[in-house]
Image: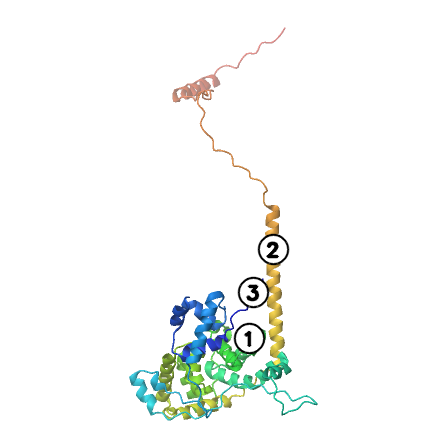
């Protein structure tokens, strides 16, 4: 008996992007599939995967969403994202006045193709899968790290305002990517995968409890850079991240909403409110192009270097080995304690003695009665009288 193969599904990032592109909520997807909202959220984050009939229904729904998406224009240029369609009426007026966004270089790592081998025709069409196989996993990871890590460290610095935390977040994100490399390697946007992991780690609220975060980090040297950094750090974390992705990195609105796990209207509102807060403190940055230029200059002004990719891979592998050995040791300890408990535990049941019950017909205990007050007084008088009399005569034998 052979088992039928599972229905193929897109990656978790692609699932979230398809849902956001159609302006659907997780609750609506859950109702159409027949599961809960928490289950859909778990599928989109990659923590769990659908199985059985739910997998087939979910795959068919994603295929319908992908078919309903508008096809790209033949010119190869993406249409400009209009925030006015996703924002309220008051915010739509301000969004309609801004000029169209210029094409920006997206912070996406492009893996270089391997050189053709000796004796191989360069003009011959080669299968893309064969080209990917020419790179080993370590080489592909190093290429992704080389293209993304320096820019990602600077972006994370704008998000957190702390240099050490920015480097640590990027290192942890790439260590997690190397740990899950089979999943990251087939992701349509591996740079976005690593960027989302770095941002999630950098924005964790547990960093506030660290002793190193009690003191603020050194501000930038330039006065304008300090003011812009102060304005960015005054924004709520969700607004700051959305603004950085849209106006700093250059993502479009659906991709920004998908990466921040928000709906398209919510992402548009966050961008408009964040721009308004920045323009209130810095009127020169009311134009989105000026804001993008200043964010790029502020990130480039910091000399933040990422460690070598080999060091990141080695540290990640050491951490994995450490936690694996720790899990094995804890498991062995639990097994030993369980075996010891089974060994010393009693093998048979010992009933507890029954509680005592009164027995009738037994005579009470007898003995000398207690002296009354009259008897005690008489005994004292006798002792006093005898003490003053003549000595007692003792018989003597002749």
Distance between the alpha carbons at the discs numbered 1 and 3? 23 Å
Which residue lies under the disc numbered 1? Answer: 183
**CB atoms of marks 1 and 2 within 8 Å:** no
- Marked residue nearer the N-terminal end (1 or 3): 3
Q: Residue 283's x, y, as percent? A: 36, 91
SS of the residue under disc 3:
loop
Determine if residue 165 is in view.
no
SS of the residue under disc 2:
helix
SS of the residue under disc 1:
helix
Distance between the alpha carbons at the discs numbered 1 and 2? 33 Å
Q: How many marks?
A: 3
Is 74 above or below relative to 17? below
Distance between the alpha carbons at the discs numbered 2 and 3? 35 Å
Give the number of the disc on residue 393.
none
Q: Who is closer to the viewer here, 226 or 265?
A: 265
Q: Residue 122's x, y, as percent? A: 64, 91
Which residue lies under the disc numbered 2? Answer: 335
- Marked residue nearer the N-terminal end (1 or 2): 1
Q: Residue 317's x, y, as percent? A: 62, 73
Q: Who is closer to the viewer here, 152 or 30?
A: 30
Give the number of the disc on residue 3.
3
Work out which residue is located at the far top of the displayed protein and give it: 398
């Amino acid at each position: 008996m052979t088992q039928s193969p599972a229905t193929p599904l897109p990656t978790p990032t692609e699932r979230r992007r398809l849902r956001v592109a159609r302006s659907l909520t997780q609750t609506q997807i859950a109702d159409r599939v027949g599961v809960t909202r928490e289950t859909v959220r778990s599928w989109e984050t990659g923590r769990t995967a659908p199985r059985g009939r739910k997998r087939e229904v979910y795959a068919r729904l994603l295929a319908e969403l992908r078919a309903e998406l508008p096809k790209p224009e033949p010119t190869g240029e993406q249409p400009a994202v209009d925030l006015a369609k996703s924002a309220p009426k008051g915010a739509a007026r301000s969004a309609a006045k801004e000029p169209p966004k210029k094409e920006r270089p997206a912070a996406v790592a492009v893996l270089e193709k391997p050189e053709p081998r000796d004796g191989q025709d360069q003009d011959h069409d080669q299968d893309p899968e064969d080209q990917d196989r020419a790179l080993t996993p370590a080489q592909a990871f190093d290429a992704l790290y080389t293209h993304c890590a320096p820019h990602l460290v600077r972006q994370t610095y704008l998000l957190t305002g702390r240099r050490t935390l920015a480097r640590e977040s990027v290192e942890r994100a790439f260590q997690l990517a190397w740990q899950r490399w089979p999943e990251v390697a087939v992701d349509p946007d591996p740079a976005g995968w690593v960027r989302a992991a770095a941002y999630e780690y950098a924005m964790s609220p547990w960093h506030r409890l660290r002793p190193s975060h009690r003191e603020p980090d050194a501000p930038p040297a330039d006065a304008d850079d300090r003011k812009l950094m102060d304005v960015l750090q005054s924004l709520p974390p969700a607004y700051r991240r959305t603004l950085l992705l849209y106006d700093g990195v250059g993502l479009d609105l659906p991709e920004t909403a998908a990466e921040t796990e928000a709906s398209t209207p919510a992402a548009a509102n966050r961008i408009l409110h964040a721009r308004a807060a920045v323009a209130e403190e810095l009127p020169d940055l009311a134009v989105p192009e000026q804001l993008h230029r200043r964010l790029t200059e502020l990130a480039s002004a910091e000399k933040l270097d990422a460690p070598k990719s080999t060091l990141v891979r080695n540290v990640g592998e050491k951490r994995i080995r450490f936690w694996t050995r720790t899990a094995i040791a804890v498991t062995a300890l639990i097994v030993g304690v369980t075996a010891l408990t089974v060994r010393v535990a009693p093998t048979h049941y010992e009933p507890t003695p029954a509680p005592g019950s009164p027995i009738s017909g037994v005579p009470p205990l007898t003995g000398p009665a207690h002296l009354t007050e009259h008897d005690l007084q008489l005994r004292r008088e006798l002792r006093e009288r005898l003490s003053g009399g003549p000595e007692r005569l003792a018989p003597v034998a002749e």
